Image (spheres, coloured by chain):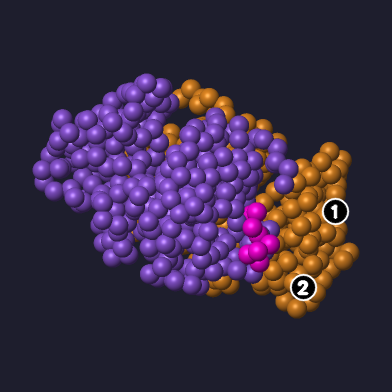
Chain colours: A orange, B purple
Amino acid sequence: MAGVIPPTYADVESAAARLLGHAHRTPVLTSSRVDDEVGARVFFKCENFQRMGAFKFRGAFNALSRFDDEQRRAGVVAYSSGNHAQAIALSARLLGIPATIVMPHDAPAAKVAATRGYGATVVSYDRYAEDREAIGRALAATRGLTLVPPYDHADVIAGQGTAAKELIEEVDGLDALFVCLGGGGLLSGSLLAAQALSPSTRVYGVEPAAGDDGQRSLRSGEIVHIDTPDTIADGAQTQHLGELTFAIIRREVDDIHTATDAELVDAMRVFASTLKIVVEPTGCLAFAAVRRLAPELAGQRIGVLVSGGNVDLARYAELISRPAPAR
Amino acid sequence: MAGVIPPTYADVESAAARLLGHAHRTPVLTSSRVDDEVGARVFFKCENFQRMGAFKFRGAFNALSRFDDEQRRAGVVAYSSGNHAQAIALSARLLGIPATIVMPHDAPAAKVAATRGYGATVVSYDRYAEDREAIGRALAATRGLTLVPPYDHADVIAGQGTAAKELIEEVDGLDALFVCLGGGGLLSGSLLAAQALSPSTRVYGVEPAAGDDGQRSLRSGEIVHIDTPDTIADGAQTQHLGELTFAIIRREVDDIHTATDAELVDAMRVFASTLKIVVEPTGCLAFAAVRRLAPELAGQRIGVLVSGGNVDLARYAELISRPAPAR
């Protein structure tokens, strides 16, 4: 069965070939003011400029590109209230595949509308009474749909790895790379790319301080499950790593750091005022950790994966209006 | 005397050579969602990612690069409360030239601090009682400083033209290019580049509806002076075009359009929510006009110069929180 064998760097390369001409090759931004503040050279890989506003397009498009004719005809199902839903919906539209997205009944109207706007069928569920994974599996079984999970899937991981591949190919001699961590799709894909292309680059995951299951999993050697963490980083409100992502992370990652919501807001304000880019809370995780760890990174060349920019405008305005939190 | 002879495209090429390795080659962003909304292919040249956050760095650095040894020793003077001040201050620091900036006594503390942060000396004046141009000229005369005006100077115009040059070289077959218009430095430089590199591309200036002196000047054939216009586009609150800029604009421009403050806010929100970039009000002028003129632009390839991203964060948050104005 596709998707359960851990991917390798060869899969990242194949994914890059499939994404060529479909995904944006996103720009790498730098800022001498940020460099002065951090005391290091920082290279921002801006996946907030990716199609549908987040790196998730890479994994979704790669996974759907590998569907056989029967799978394409029957369609794809995914459960997500966030970027994965829109990534699957857009990729399915581009590839002419019917898409069904399982979303909570109280998902923001704008997100439901955006998903429908890409031509997907939205199935609602009661997030307090029903299990979205079970609904997704049931739809897959009864209608012959192929389920594409948000992170624990070889093709998804391989697709996500293409962002780090592009960054490492464009920027020589990175000493370290910081990547946000939710379910681990982006981090595990980045690890495959870094290990193959720049083995001396240290790679760090960064997760919300309120949801440090990744850090605890790494320390304990087994996947730790937690309650849904209370954090503004809605893209990293995962309860546990995946089997495939953890297998890679455990083997390759240098360490896992955390960032508080106050640090995320602080980073978000620097992104807006200095780099002039809109970054969603989850996309601020990596840079927040770099800012905190700056003394240890002095003089180094640092890569930062900016994962996405999908945030409600009113909410965004409220966050950047906050006075900078005490450091 | 340097600066009073109208520049040509050869000067834009020389400026590009001087800026190589000093100015950022800013990315060109596209969005299929914007394309769908506008009904055209739109290419955004993102000068909000330029050094110090605006295209003004190009003209300032080019002008200061041409100083002779005596001018470099004596230093530069400029009057501005906005991006030109910071562009001169940063360029002077990079080139080791002392800089004096004449700023109004009630300029925002953050802007004064930023200008001082680049190592410039700030001279305050009372904007209600004193004439900044006279103060600038007096400092130039008594201390031997070289005055670099914000737009009506051949080296400044030639430097600004390098942004459009990069865009036209990167994107083939533009049918039209939209450029914001204050004093005319960016527009006249863009006209030189377009005329030389892509003469079939129509080039339009876009100024605030509250300050339509450019449009009126074009219609009447002579430079129209107005009171300082009341608009959120603070970078385009100029009272008249320059002699040099008008000479080029009058000869080359296809037309001049205007945009209301409500249209600027609307464009600013699209920049944030769809393109994920922070753009200052003046930087929204060109795109606002494209959105309004969309029916006439159907199916075309359109370039949009995004001039800068320097806006106070609290102010920015307030603007993007506003409900979209009626269209």
- Residue A257 vs A139, above or below: the answer is above
Q: Which residue is mark 1?
A: A123
Q: Decide which of tag 2 and tag 1 comes sooner along the chain.
A: 2
**Mark 2 residue type:** Gln
- Element at label 1: strand
Q: Which residue is mark 2?
A: A71
Residue B85 screen position, x and y as percent: 34, 37
Magenta run includes residue B297: yes
Q: CA distance from mark 2 to mark 1?
A: 20 Å
Q: In the rendered structure, which segment of residues is drawn in magenta?
A: B291-298
Residue at horizontal 54 percent and vertical 29 percent from the top:
B314
Q: Quadrant of residue A318?
A: top right
Magenta run includes residue A66: no
Residue B34 screen position, x and y as percent: 64, 57
Disc 2: which chain? Answer: A
Residue B105 screen position, x and y as percent: 37, 22
Residue B184 screen position, x and y as percent: 42, 50
> Mark 1 packing: few (<14 Cα in 10 Å), some, or many (20+)?
some
